[in-house]
Image (spheres, grey):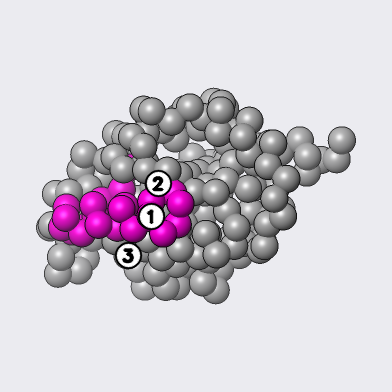
Amino acid sequence: MTQNENKIPVAMLIIDVINDFNFPEAPLLLKTSAPIAEKISKLKKRAKKEGIPVIYVNDNFGQWQSDKQKLVEYCMQQDGGEFVKKLQPDDDDYFVIKPKHSGFFSTPLSTLLNDLNVLTLIICGVAGNICVLFTANDAYMRGFDIYAPSDCTASNIEEDNERALILMKKTLDADISLSEELDLTAIIEQANKSKQRKIY
């Protein structure tokens, strides 16, 4: 068995939760995002117990010269500091900076997922109708199986978030079950059984 075959073929992507919330719609997004912080945190802990790698995919909010820790510290000092504090990355988490909406556009995410031998993605974060949706769309086109737990994503307007989730379910074949309903062991087993050739 090769080293690649020993890797868990599932990864958890956490999108734009390290956020300075410095934009006109920020108060709305902070309000709708508050309930998902604990949900994402609990799901992340469960994922890590199963050996699932956690990858933060994040804008840098103009802080191009900052490393991960400096970006986290900067965002914790902004209006959404309490939200960021609950979801800050651990030392062994991966951290990818994205310049645009999709986590795949002009980033090393595809290369990282290929190196980790990942076939299935659990996608969480903000905003559900923009960066989460765009990332899920690009993941689908690359052949990944997608889980987008409906209680782990938020948008400025709740109705927009619901529409985005429905779109992911119908168009991207995403599972949008609640995070507590996800059987991570079964998801890993299913990914291990998958023989479908993935396109990165």
Vertical order, 70 against 104 (above or below)? above
Looking at the image, residue 184 lies above or below residue 127: above
The mark found on residue 170 in the picture is: 1
Residue at mark 3 to residue at mark 2: CA–CA distance = 13 Å
Note whether residue 132 is visible. Answer: no
Residue ID at (21%, 65%): 22
Point out residue 160 in the picture as x, y percentages from the top left corner: 20, 59
Which residue is denoted by mark 2 in the rendering? Answer: 148
Q: Amino acid at mark 3?
A: Ile
Residue ID at (38%, 51%): 169
Please tell me in which quadrant of the rendered image residue 110 appears.
bottom right
Point out the frontmost of discs 1 and 3: 1
Residue where numbered disc 3 is placed: 130
> Which region shows up in magenta?
152-174
Q: Amino acid at mark 1?
A: Lys
Mark 3 surroundings within 10 Å by alpha-carbon count, few (fewer than 14), some (14 through 19), many (20 or more):
some
Element type where label 3 sits in the image: helix
| x and y percentages locating residue 138 in the rendered image | 50, 65
Screen quadrant of the N terminus: top right
**Is residue 160 rendered magenta in the image?**
yes
- Please name whichever residue, 136 or 40, is drawn nearer the observer in this view of the structure: 136
